[in-house]
Each structure stands twice: as C-alpha cells, then as structure tokens.
C-alpha cells in the first residue's frame, strides 16, 4: 500500500462543507494531492479541530486550505458535501443551491476516492455494499475474508475510515466500501466491479421522497456496471425481488442471496448454520454470525469473494475466524448466568428485529430517537420479552406501543438506570439475555451508536449482583 501522488489534484479547486468524519479526511486528502480547498462547517468546534490538524501539515499543504464561509462556487471543480447535509430533500442546503447554480458537481468522498485511484494508475477493484440493514457486517466480513486470503484490501466509506482516508492499493487490491443512500446520491464515475444490495425496508424516507425514491437511490450501487461485473441482491423483501428481476437481464451477472431457503430458490443461501450455493454446501458460518440475517450477510460476502477470486476453502476460513462487528450482537459481559448483548448499531426497528429473533426469552433495552413507525413492526417479538426498559427522547412513544399490547415495560430514561434494572429483572425471572437493541437513533443522548454501545458495555461489566429489581408502568 502506498500514498497517493502529491500532484494528483494539482490545478483543481474544491469546496468541502461539513467537517465531520468524512469532511476532514476529504480536506486533508485533497490538499495533500495538490488541490486548493475551501472548507467550512457551521460549528466552531469543528473548524477549530481542522485548524489544529492544519497546524501539523507541511506549510505548502496547509497553505492550500482555506477555512471560510462558502459564498460562491464559480470556478470550483466540485463540492464535497457531508452525507448528512441534504442537497435536494427535505430542503437543499444553500451551498448545494450555489453548486447547482454554478453547474458544479456535488460529490461523495467515495466518488473522489475512485477518481484518485484511477488517476494514480491503479487498477484496484471496487466492491460496494448497501442495504437498509446488514451492510456494515457484510462490508467488514468481506474485507476480513479478502485479508485472510492475502489480498491487499482497504475497507471504509459509511463504516470505519472515510473513503478519502484509505490508502492507494496496488492493481490486485480491493476497496470494500459501505455505501449509504446519502453517498449513493452523489456518484458520478464510480463503478463497482462487485455491487450488493442486501435488503430494503423503510428508512430515510424524508430524504428520498418516500420508499420508491429510497429504493431508486439504493439501486445506484449497480450504476455503470458491465458484463464483466457482478450484481448481488437479497430476495427476502418484495422491493428487492422486483429489482432482482431487472438485474437478471444484465448487463452484469446477477446472483440472488437469502439468509434461508426461499421460493423460488436464491443462488446462494443460508441453511443449518452454513452457506449453500446451488444446493451445495460450500462453507460453515462461524460463531460470530448468529441468525438468518447474518446468514444473508455471509451469503453476500461469499458471492462477492468468489467473484473476486477467493476459493471456497479460503472463504470458509474467513467465515470461521471473523470476530464480529462492534455493537452488532456482541456478547460483552456475563454475570450469574445473564449474558449482556450489545446491539447498539440497531438504529431502526428492522435492524432490532434481526437480533430479537435470535432469543426465545430476553430483557430488552430500547429507545432514543425513533424512526418512522416506531416499534410497531416488532409486536410479534413482544411475547419473548420478560420486560422492556425504555430510554431516550421517544421512550413514551415506544411505551404506548408496548402498553397497547400489554407488554411489560418501564420508562427509565437513561442507560445508567436501564442496565442494572434489566439485570435485576433477568435474575428474578431467570431470563438468560439482556439485549441493548434500541431500534432508534442515538443522537438525543450520545454522539453516535458507538458511544451508546460503549457506555452499555461499561455498565454491563460493572453491574452488581446485589442489584434489586426496578419496575414501574405495566411492570
């Protein structure tokens, strides 16, 4: 792995709006590649953090970075907009309107990574993974399989390192990128050699004008593919089944996947804790991938890895040694026969359903900033719950759903209150699992799902065996 040439973007002028996890790496990579960059963030803290980083850069690189409000984009080559800043719906940011007026493309950092790799002369391949749920696990799993097989690999995008923080790979390397719908909106020339759409359930509907718009944006992961490429698609929901029917017509070869046998049969599927391809068992699934939803993720990783030249034996090794994804159904503590499971990454109800379906009896911790529909879709899992403890901004909204179905719950407000109370009830009712699977975003109380998961882990590891039960409403 090498660094990108220092003259890669010489003569180019970019604007970067939003100096978070994606924006700062974009500013630094563009400037290090020779571009002039005008950067801005409405938050003073973010601007100060960038200034500190610029102070450590070589003088010539730092001189190419200007931190100032973006009032015109005339003469710029592109605008890199933080994924969370809308450029169309629900209301375009004023700087996005400036870009439209000036005819300047609005780009994701993944698009700029692709351009940089190609301009640097590397023929490294690109694998893109999207879907409402499972994309982080599948991205990490595919990268793990490739690395175990000795392939130079770099993984990032919506997960982990920002795209422009990734290194330059040689011709035999593979970039594995998790692609959010926000990133897929802003592609130009990026073409994925192997692309995957895992599933589609309602999410970010205000940003994409409803489910049809959301589905349309997600299919952009297949944009520009040729007969030399691979399209992988899950077929467990009707939206994806309809998309698969179109993909089967080409130009890319299309492989369908599922976490369990379906009718008509998918090409690759999970069954009996193993992956099957055209009714032939090809690999066992390791212990870090429980449930049919993870079997779907493993099936996707198998299909893409095979296309990228990895043998069945090498894939089987990677599946077995995969350590799992942080904050995705990770066992983080055990006390007196009660297991604590961190599934903080479940930020919507569909994601939580995948964890809830793995346990016959549990104490559930949920809540935060609810998505559209709340937890109504999780009603079938309520009988499995010995008790539910609700935290966060929309706890009362979730409580109304539980109340309507006579499911026992307590609104406790915070994780600090929820974890010891959940442990006490688990011991009292001989329930083997305390599951944090919030079904909600975390930003009302935490900087992100990672911080929420880490706090849960701290509390789970220090919970006292002497904790007494705390139940309230309907408890």
Image (cartoon, helix red, strand yellow):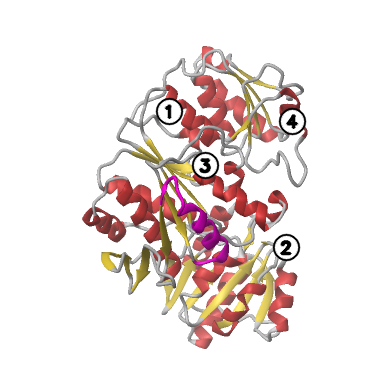
286, above or below 218, in the image: below
Q: Which residues are magenta?
A: 236-253
Distance between the alpha carbons at the discs numbered 3 and 4: 26 Å
Label 1 neighbour load within 10 Å: few <14, some 14-19, many 20+:
many
Q: Of callouts 2 and 4, which one flags the residue occurring earlier in the amino acid sequence?
A: 4
Residue beneath the point at 40% across and 41% down: 193
Q: CA distance from mark 2 to mark 1?
A: 43 Å
Q: Single out the mark in the foreground, 3 or 2.
A: 3
Which residue carries the number 2 mark? 393
Q: Are marks 4 and 1 in contact (CB under 8 Å)?
A: no
Earlier-in-chain disc, 4 versus 1? 4
Q: Position of residue 346 (x, y in %)?
A: 55, 62
Helix, strand or loop for disc 1? helix
Relative horizontal placement of residue 333, taking residue 418 as reference (left or right): left
Magenta stretch contains residue 303 = no
Checking the image for residue 95, the label placed there is 4
Disc 3 crowd rating (10 Å Cα; few below 14, some 14-19, many 20+) is some
Point out the image quarter for the N terminus. Answer: top left
Which of the two discs, 2 and 1, sits closer to the camera? 1
Quadrant where the C terminus sits is bottom right
- Residue 26 visible in the snapshot: yes
Disc nearer the start of the sequence (2/1): 1
Q: Nearer the viewer, mark 1 or mark 3?
A: 3
Closest to the observer, 386 or 250: 250
Q: Which mark is residue 117?
A: 1
Percent position (x, y) of residue 465?
Answer: 48, 77
Task: Tell me what residue is drawn at x 56 percent, y 53 percent.
Answer: 451
């Amino acid at each position: 792995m090498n660094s990108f040439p220092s003259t890669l973007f010489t003569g180019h002028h970019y604007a970067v709006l939003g100096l978070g996890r994606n924006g700062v790496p974009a500013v630094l990579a563009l400037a290090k590649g020779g571009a002039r960059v005008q950067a801005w963030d409405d938050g003073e803290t973010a601007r100060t953090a960038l200034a500190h980083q610029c102070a450590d850069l070589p003088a010539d690189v730092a001189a190419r970075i200007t931190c100032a409000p973006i009032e015109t984009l005339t003469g710029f080559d592109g605008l890199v907009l933080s994924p969370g800043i809308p450029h169309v719906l629900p209301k375009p940011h004023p700087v996005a309107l400036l870009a439209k007026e000036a005819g300047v493309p609005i780009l994701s950092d993944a698009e700029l990574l692709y351009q940089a790799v190609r301009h640097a002369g590397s023929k490294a391949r690109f694998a893109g993974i999207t879907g409402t749920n499972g994309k982080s696990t599948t991205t990490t799993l595919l990268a793990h399989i490739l690395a175990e097989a000795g392939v130079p690999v770099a993984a990032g995008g919506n997960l982990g390192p920002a795209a422009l923080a990734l290194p330059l790979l040689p011709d035999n390397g593979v970039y594995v990128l998790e692609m959010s719908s926000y990133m897929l909106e802003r592609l130009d020339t990026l073409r994925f050699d192997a692309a995957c759409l895992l599933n589609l359930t309602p999410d970010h509907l205000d940003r994409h004008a409803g489910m049809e718009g959301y589905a349309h944006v997600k299919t952009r992961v297949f944009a520009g593919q040729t007969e030399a490429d691979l399209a992988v698609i899950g077929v467990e929901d009707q939206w994806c089944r309809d998309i698969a029917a179109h993909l089967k017509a080409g130009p890319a070869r299309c492989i369908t996947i599922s976490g369990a046998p379906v009718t008509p049969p998918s090409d690759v599927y999970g069954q009996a804790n193993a992956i099957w391809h055209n009714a032939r068992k090809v690999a066992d699934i390791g212990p870090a991938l429980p449930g049919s939803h993870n079997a779907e993720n493993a099936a996707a990783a198998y299909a893409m890895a095979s296309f990228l030249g990895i043998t069945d034996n090498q894939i089987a090794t990677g599946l077995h040694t995969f350590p799992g994804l942080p904050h995705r159904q990770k066992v983080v503590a055990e006390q007196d026969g009660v297991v604590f499971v961190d599934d903080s990454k479940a930020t919507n109800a569909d994601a939580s359903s995948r964890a809830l379906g793995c346990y016959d009896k549990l104490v559930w911790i949920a809540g935060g900033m609810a998505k559209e529909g709340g937890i109504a879709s999780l009603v079938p899992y309520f009988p499995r719950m010995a008790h539910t403890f609700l935290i966060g901004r929309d706890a009362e909204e979730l409580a109304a759903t539980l109340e309507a179905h006579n499911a026992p719950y307590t609104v406790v407000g915070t994780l600090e209150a929820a974890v010891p109370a959940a442990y006490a009830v688990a011991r009292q009712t001989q329930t083997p699992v305390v599951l944090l699977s919030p079904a909600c975003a975390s930003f009302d109380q935490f900087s992100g799902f990672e911080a929420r998961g880490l706090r849960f882990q701290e509390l789970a590891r220090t919970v006292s065996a002497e904790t007494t039960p705390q139940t309230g409403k309907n408890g």
